[in-house]
Amino acid sequence: MSLLDKDHQPLGRILTRLGILNEDTRTDFLPPLPIGTLGTAFPKPQHCYLGFGEPIDLSECKGKRLQKKRLYAIREQVAGQIEQQLKELFVQARAKQAE
């Protein structure tokens, strides 16, 4: 659950009341807000794993208006890359924890 969850988190409710978030806001597009030591903004040390997938060539799409079918195909390709990266990162994280 995100700190910006409009229905369940105080920050999300406040931002909704201020008009910053609305029913069309996708919280999965918003960056995560870190919770630090004792729930404050003071950072607490934790591991961070980053991964970058293979570039997806979209040059054939430049300047074109794509049909939904093609957009969904591109989205599925991106989702596949993300899933692959997550699998690899989980393996790295577990290996690190086992040390």
Image (tube, rainbow, N blue to C red):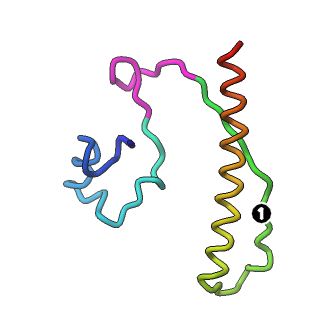
Badge 1, how many Cα within 10 Å: few under 14, some, many 20+?
few
Rendered image quadrant of residue 65: bottom right
Q: Position of residue 97 (x, y in %)?
A: 65, 18
Q: Position of residue 3 (x, y in %)?
A: 35, 40
- Tell me if residue 86 comes above or below residue 49 in the rendering: below
Identify residue for label 1.
Answer: 56
Nearest the viewer among 31 and 93 is 93
Magenta region: which residues? 34-46
Please tell me which residue is depicted at 70% across the width and 64% down the height of the picture: 77
Q: Secondary structure at mark 1?
A: loop
Nearest the viewer among 21 and 75 is 75
- Tell me if residue 11 comes above or below residue 27 in the rendering: above
Quarter placement of the C terminus:
top right
- Total number of numbered discs in the rendering: 1
Quarter placement of the N terminus:
top left
- Tell me if residue 78 comes above or below residue 88 in the rendering: below
Instruction: Name which residue type carries label 1.
Output: Ile
Rendered image quadrant of residue 95: top right
Please tell me which residue is depicted at 63% across the width and 76% down the height of the picture: 71
